[in-house]
Amino acid sequence: MENNRNFFITIALSVLILTLWQVFYMNPRVEAQRETARIEAERVAEQQKAAQPAGTAPGSSTGMAAAPQAGVPGATTAQAAVVDRAQALAASGRIALDTPSLKGSINLTGARIDDISLKHYRVAVEPNSPVIELLNPQALPAGFYSEIGFVGSEATGAVPGPDTVWTAEANATLTPAKPVTLTYINDKGLTFKRTIAVDQNYMFTVTDTVANAGSTDVALSNYGRLTRFDKPLHASTYVLHEGLIGVTGTEGLQEINYATIEDDKQVLPGKSTDGWLGITDKYWAAALVPSGKQPFQPRFSYFEDGRPRYQADFMTDPITVAAGQSATVETLVFAGAKEVAKINAYEADRQIRQFELLIDWGWFYFITKPMFWLIDTLYKMLGNFGLAILATTVIVKAIFFPLANKSYKSMANMKMVQPKMLEIREKYADDKMKQQQAMMELYKTEKINPLAGCWPVLIQIPVFFALYKVLYVTIEMRHAPFFGWIHDLAAPDPTSLFNLFGLLPWDVPAFLLIGVWPLIMGVTMFLQMRMNPTPPDPTQAMIFTWMPILFTFMLASFPAGLVIYWAWNNSLSILQQGVIMKRQGAKIELWDNLVALFKKKPTPAE
């Protein structure tokens, strides 16, 4: 049994590594994320309390944006003033925005989309929590905005850029049913008309028409940029990409995290005629989709001059506008939640190349995406994501039923030959080689796989990680309630054994947050392992004893939905294994093992 011993020692070392990783990395990270969420909620609440409805009359520019440097869109040099949101919004003329999904305004200076709040999403699970503010004016510390403009030459005269003040109809409001038109006329006879439309969800369509009333042809390039002055307070994980992202040219998907772009300063993919680029967070994103009519140069950058900022931008090849003629260019701007159905619909309806990759499905997308589809489909039938996860577990168990059956039958057969195994160990107690050979011959004769019991665990590992990915990255799971005290399946169980589940007034440290569901999971795992005979080898027996406890601590900080899945899966496995063992005539060791565990062992004197 030397191979078996090595196998279980490997499991023990793996569990030890995972435990250390959980205690010294994941738990402090969870604590930091909770503190970040608290600070963010307080910040947004203060800003919204101070905010007043934005005026619509044109006002002065904030003075924060300078003209693009050397024809490169978006270089700013001034530091942002420390102001609240109301002051930032009042510093310039604005057009109100109101849709079923969004509220905010568009800045007439630069025609920036820089004031976007998501009506259906809040900072915390509480219903009175502030709504998510996705895009913010440049003057704010969390400045984040979209801007579209032109780069011209001496022949074109001044063209729309960061400081351009556009003219709009008085009291105009942008709604899905009513686009708005902005106008700018320069000193060279060029008239720029910008029509901004928005759909029911998160997509803006910006259509620029340039009319040349002069006597000579002119050429100018269209640019678009997403500029962000802050980054998430907590670092991204290997599970999820947050930062600059895009799909363009032959390079395809580009994922550049904040640390990388800070080091490299600039990433310049090849020119493209299709695709998109943007900046993504865990649940939200902003992206630009340039027109496919003109080749464009995508770019990802980090600027340190004046005020540090991250930027995803593009610039088209020069567009020629003949004298007396006009030219039109269209740019799509996405700003909203990364809802799977809507992202997929945009990709299909707007013909946006691989727009689905805005959601980080990971390397194992061929498992993750079907898992999400199944859970989401069941949710639409059952009305609760927790119930959908339970139903998904049953379906997964049914799919792998034949393989699990085979494993449990092999385990039951091993129990039947347990006396013969003990005889071999006693007979060859001093000769491990002969003992191993005799064991292998017994397995071969009785057609037993000694590692068959590992298959049920190995089978559920990819399912486990796929479900973890779905719970972690998809916004549909965010703040999804179950029953009782679980108000967010994507967050850990908030209760703790160490303050008697809230009865004691003690703020429990993150590593001691062992909630009800992790305890249920640990108990079901303990019972499942105790259905088998206690291993004669002391090392194996120790692993079987401590593994449920270690897993209870490890999974305590995982999403509650994942822990519920594991507990339910264990319960189904216990029932399945019990039925198969009974049919095979094998003894179910659960009760005997429990009695032996708590029975007082005799002392040597006795």
Image (tube, rainbow, N blue to C red):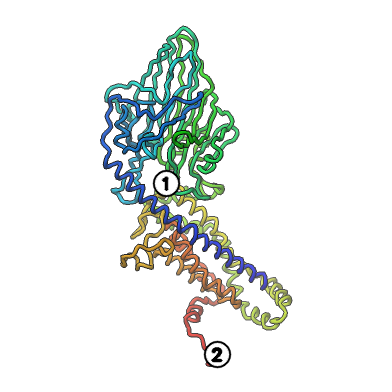
Which quadrant of the view contains residue 543?
bottom right
For residue 475, the mark is: 1
Q: Nearer the viewer, mark 1 or mark 2?
A: 2
Q: Residue at x 54, y 36 (%)?
A: 265
| Relative to 466, residue 285 above or below | above
What is the C-alpha distance between the residues marked 1 and 2?
60 Å
Left or right for 159, reference 455? left
Dot placed on the residue nearer the N-terminal end, 1 or 2: 1
Query: How many residues crowd mark 1 within 10 Å: few (<14), some (14–19), many (20+)?
Result: many
Left or right for 469, reference 132? right
| Relative to 560, residue 153 above or below | above
Which quadrant of the view contains residue 204?
top left
Query: Which one is nearer the viewer's eye here, 415 or 111?
Result: 111
Q: Position of residue 249 (x, y in %)?
A: 58, 32
**SS at badge 2:** loop
Query: Which one is nearer the viewer's eye here, 53 or 240?
Result: 53
Left or right for 105, reference 475? left
Query: Which one is nearer the viewer's eye here, 352 or 443?
Result: 352
Q: Residue at x 38, y 65 (%)?
A: 496
Q: Residue at x 40, y 15 (%)?
A: 186
Residue linked to disc 2: 604
